[in-house]
Image (tube, rainbow, N blue to C red):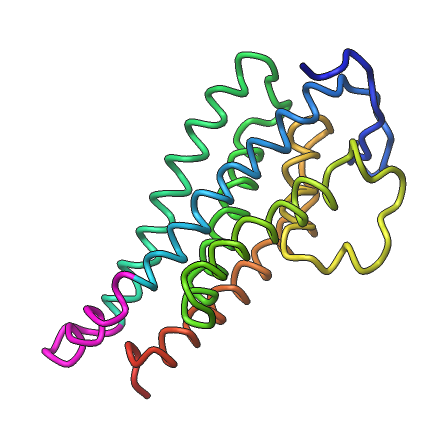
Amino acid sequence: MTPSVDLPVRVSVGMLTLELMRPMGQINGVVMTAAASVFITGIVGLFTMFRSRDADRRLVRTGFGSTNLVVSRIGLLLLVSVVATAFGTGVLLFSVWPNHLGQFVFGVIVLAVTYGFVGLAVGQTVDRLAGLYVMLFVPMLDIAVFQNPTFIRGDPPTWMTVLPSYHAMQVVLDAAFGGGARLLNVELAVVVLGLAGLLAGTTFHRAGVIHT
């Protein structure tokens, strides 16, 4: 159903940033693969906090290490992100083969786990229905609109570059259409992932799962 038109995509090629023309269907396929992995992992993070909060507190009180508990929750998010990314990328490969497949998968997984951590935090902050709306609409706006080359042309405004998905999506787009991800974007995407992890850790502390 996507129109058969070519659109410009800003990507890194060596030390340069170029606008390359790519079919709109390929662009949408790449962006929606990332968005789908984020939706799934973020919602799993959200409902993990809702469903396991009381059980986690009881486990910690009975002697189960809080560190082990947090690691298990992170492991769950990582597993979900890997499965969702593998499935989405497998479907994508029928129509688009990223120039650097390993970097593409890495960028999508980092992005998905980042929003998984956000989902854990949202699950502690608001109720179930509000949390579901947040984890549907925030990633949709962030990834499928603000980081989507079919909507945003040229240099993005400064405020878009501080959104959680910006650097990871640069990795995804550069890996899919360009000459490979820039190291700076990879490093900053990992930094954002770490900050989201700290947010999730604070959430576990507020929920009484981690005690100082």
Residue 203: x %, y % from top left? 42, 74
For residue 158, what is the image quadrant? bottom right
Residue found farthest to the front: 129
Identified at 59% across, 18% down, the residue is 97
- Tell me if 30 is positioned left or right of 40 in this view: right
Q: Quadrant of the N terminus?
A: top right
Identified at 46% across, 51% down, the residue is 42
- Tell me if 76 is positioned left or right of 90 in this view: left
Residue 206: x %, y % from top left? 38, 81
Image position of 169 with respect to 77: above or below: above
Image position of 101 with respect to 80: above or below: above
Residue range corresponding to the magenta coloring: 51-66
Image position of 172 with respect to 56: above or below: above
Image position of 155 with respect to 187: above or below: above
Q: Nearer the viewer, residue 142 or 210?
A: 142
- Tell me if 57 is positioned left or right of 128 in this view: left
Residue found farthest to the right: 154
Identified at 10% across, 78% down, the residue is 62
